[in-house]
Image: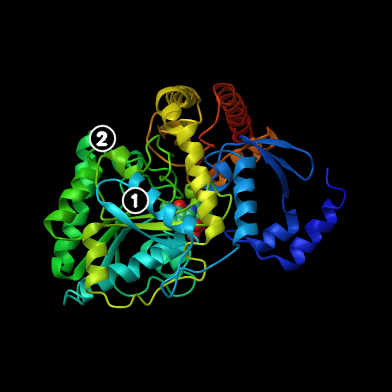
Amino acid sequence: MVANLQQLQALDAAHHIHPFNDNADLVKKGTRILTRGEGCHVWDAQGNKLLDAFAGLWCVNVGYGRKSIAAAAAKQMEQLAFYNSFFQCTTEPTVHLAAKLAALAPADLNHVFFTNSGSEGNDTVLRMVRHFWAVQDKPEKNIIIGRYNGYHGSTVAGASMGGMKSMHAQGGLPIPDIHHIEPPFFFEDGGEHSEQEYGLLAAQRLEAKILELGPDRVAAFIGEPIMGAIGVYIPPRSYWPEIERICRKYDVLLVSDEVICGYGRTGEWFGADYFGFTPDIMTTAKGLTSGYIPMGAVIFNERVARVLRDKGGELTHGYTYSGHPVCAVVALENIRILEEEKILENCRENTGPYLAQRWQELAEHPLVGEARIAGMLGALELVPDKSARRFFEDRGKVGALCRTMALGNGLILRATNDSMLLSPPLVITRKEIDELFDKTWMSLDETAKAIA
Ligand code: PXG
């Protein structure tokens, strides 16, 4: 227990405005302060040990406490703490990382622009996509289509392309020339269709929207391969290939927001690999450095990069810390760990299937209407009645309650509405998966009892 916890909480309440929090409520309750992490566990200031089934915020893919990452950062800080990538300069690790990402990315996505976060990545995407069409004498081809309830970050462009109503309500969003279609969510929306049929129908909403707006107006479609923040909506296998077909038919750029899915979350390097489609552009962040340091990378294919390079003139876009050398060595070390410890292979062949099996067992609980999972990304849909695909009337209350129960049982799960979300470090062991199962079941029992 940290001796000065109450003091820290008082200082926090007095001076720190938290992201995605009801700050008035937070001041009343006091912040949970985390102090240490090792593998899949974190400790809070009261000394509680918690299984972090949410990997920080969908990001600590290689787990906590990696000394080799800390050492790589320290060494680079001593040698060259910073230099920029503007004005015909860059640093050695930045170059190595760009080449490494080009090698990992699918197809001919061989060109990398560095950012500090996923949100900045998506702002970069918006500007570059519009510029791409403008320099080909199509300035009117500037509309980006996203999806309602999609999450693409908190900056102006990210939140605009995202489809969160509560975010649009603050700050006058979305900006012009952004449109949205309904997302694929079989549990809510699938009706009597088979999943694969529904996947096609949900994708065809994009075609209808393109035709409504006019193909000459639509620059790009952006989507998360699996929608994370809204509740881990895993689309049917038929969805993404159909989206790709439609984008190609109308020459609309396809942007895969891989901020959560990227770097192994699904057991493949990218969500696009998992679903078998090839985007033109990918936004990545989070798992790129496993959250050890902020960094993002937008990865472009040959076509987009060539137009931007040969016709685009000077690129009037960049962040001071684009390609920061310390972040680059952290990313390189993180990727080295993912590769050398065969973490993706292990997820695909060993722990992933085991996690899926145990997660599916949770669907037997009376409170669970659906257990969905892809690789190391899952959700439990809590429902009032197992026999119907229906939500609680007061949506979100039961999820929040279950999250609190889980914390009491030493388990961190995130709740969106009444979906309990799962995104553990990719290094989670079978023993920890059993711990996850036991603690989740117990939390579901306690939640069911509390609302009975
Ligand atoms: N795209 C996706 C798909 C994301 O999940 C971002 C972009 C933005 O990345 P940065 O690094 O700017 O945060 C994200 C981030 C939640 C939650 O409530 C999810 C994210 C961020 C904050 C909260 O689950 N994802």
Q: Identity of the amino acid at label 2?
A: Glu
The foreground one among 270 and 448 is 270
370 horizontally vs 24: left or right: left
Pointer 1 residue = 102
Q: Residue 195 carries which label?
A: 2
Above or below, 128 against 29 in this view is below
67 horizontally vs 128: left or right: right
The foreground one among 332 and 401 is 332
Residue 212 screen position, x and y as percent: 16, 65
Quarter location, residue 36: top right
Above or below, 149 against 375 in this view is below
Judge whether residue 385 can be spotted in this image.
no
Residue 283 screen position, x and y as percent: 38, 56
Above or below, 36 against 8 in this view is above
Q: Residue 366 carries which label?
A: none
Residue 288 screen position, x and y as percent: 47, 49
Image quadrant for the C terminus? top right
Q: How many marks?
A: 2
Q: Identity of the amino acid at label 1?
A: Ala
Element carrying mark 2? helix
Q: Residue at x 54, y 39 (%)?
A: 62
Q: How is the image coloured?
A: rainbow
Foreground mark, 2 or 1, reads: 1
The foreground one among 8 and 190 is 8
Q: Which residue is drawn at 61% across and 25% down?
A: 435
**Ligand 1 is within 8 Å of the C-beta of the residue at disc 1:** no
Element carrying mark 1? helix
Whichever of labels 2 and 1 marks the residue nearer the N terminus, that label is 1
Image quadrant for the N terminus? top right
450 horizontally vs 220: left or right: right
The foreground one among 390 and 277 is 277
